[in-house]
Image (tube, rainbow, N blue to C red):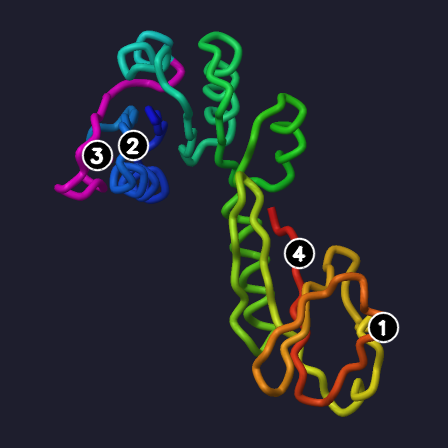
Amino acid sequence: MNVLVIGCGRLGSRLAEILDEQGHDVTVVDANPDNFLNLKKEFGGVTVTGMPMDSKVLCNAGVEGCDAMAVVTPDDNLNITVSQMAREFFGVENVVARISDPMRENVFKRFGLKTVCPTKLAGDAMSTALTLPWEPKTVTIGTSTVTFHLKKVDRAHDGMKLSNTPKSDEEIIFGVIGADGNMVLCRGNEEKTVLSKGDRIVLASVID
């Protein structure tokens, strides 16, 4: 796949390296050539210096033939502008934009843009790490990230039905890990499943 990465900061350079290691053809665009020093020497892609809002720069980077674009500069306004240019003028359908301000997420969605918000991801992950005893696990599918975390059944909830488990509106019950370590997935049997002290409930929620 031909992928265009706009922005070569910490996020952009890491993304470009991952895609390059996976065998994709990667081109990175940045207005500051010094930012290309963030890339490892082993990086096998192409770098293009220039303002991402300049259509000539995008054309030189191969936007007209790319399969996907990631716009990951630190500037939300720049990201939305370049993302719109890629979709509207160059016909790139698979565009993912980074946004630092979670409040702007709806603005991007109104334009039909897919977004990833590192601020929101980090905030949710840190909150979970502070309040839950087990390290959460995350899985990203497309541009959505799902987090799984565990809640231990204590004495107060011993004998409680799984369906009565305290949880937030954003969470769903994914399964239960018994004291023996075996996991049982929830398949609409929450009313029949009775919890025992030492069980761990697996809760899932979409964080982005």
Q: How far separated are the C-alphas under marks 1 and 4?
A: 17 Å
Give, as a three-letter code, the residue at label 3.
Phe
Q: What element carries label 1?
A: helix
Specify the segment rendered in magenta: 34-53
Task: Please tell me which of labels 1 and 4 falls first in the chain.
Answer: 1
Choose mark 2 or mark 3, whichever is in front.
2
Q: How far separated are the C-alphas under marks 2 and 3?
A: 18 Å
For image coordinates 49% across by 21% down, the residue present is 83
Q: Mark 2 = which residue?
A: 24
Task: Please tell me which of labels 4 and 2 falls first in the chain.
Answer: 2
Task: Please tell me which of labels 3 and 4 falls first in the chain.
Answer: 3
Q: How far separated are the C-alphas under marks 3 and 4?
A: 36 Å
Q: Position of residue 68 (x, y in %)?
A: 42, 25
Q: Residues within 10 Å of mark 2 (few under 14, many from 20)?
A: some
Q: Mark 3 = which residue?
A: 36
Instruction: Check if residue 161 falls in the magenta segment.
Output: no
Q: How crowded is mark 1: few (under 14 residues within 10 Å), some or many (20 or more)?
A: few
Q: How far separated are the C-alphas under marks 1 and 2?
A: 47 Å
| Circles 1 and 4: CB atoms closer than 8 Å | no
Toward the bottom, the furthest residue is 155
Q: Where is residue 134 in the image (x, y as percent from the top left)?
A: 55, 75
For image coordinates 62% across by 51% down, the residue present is 207
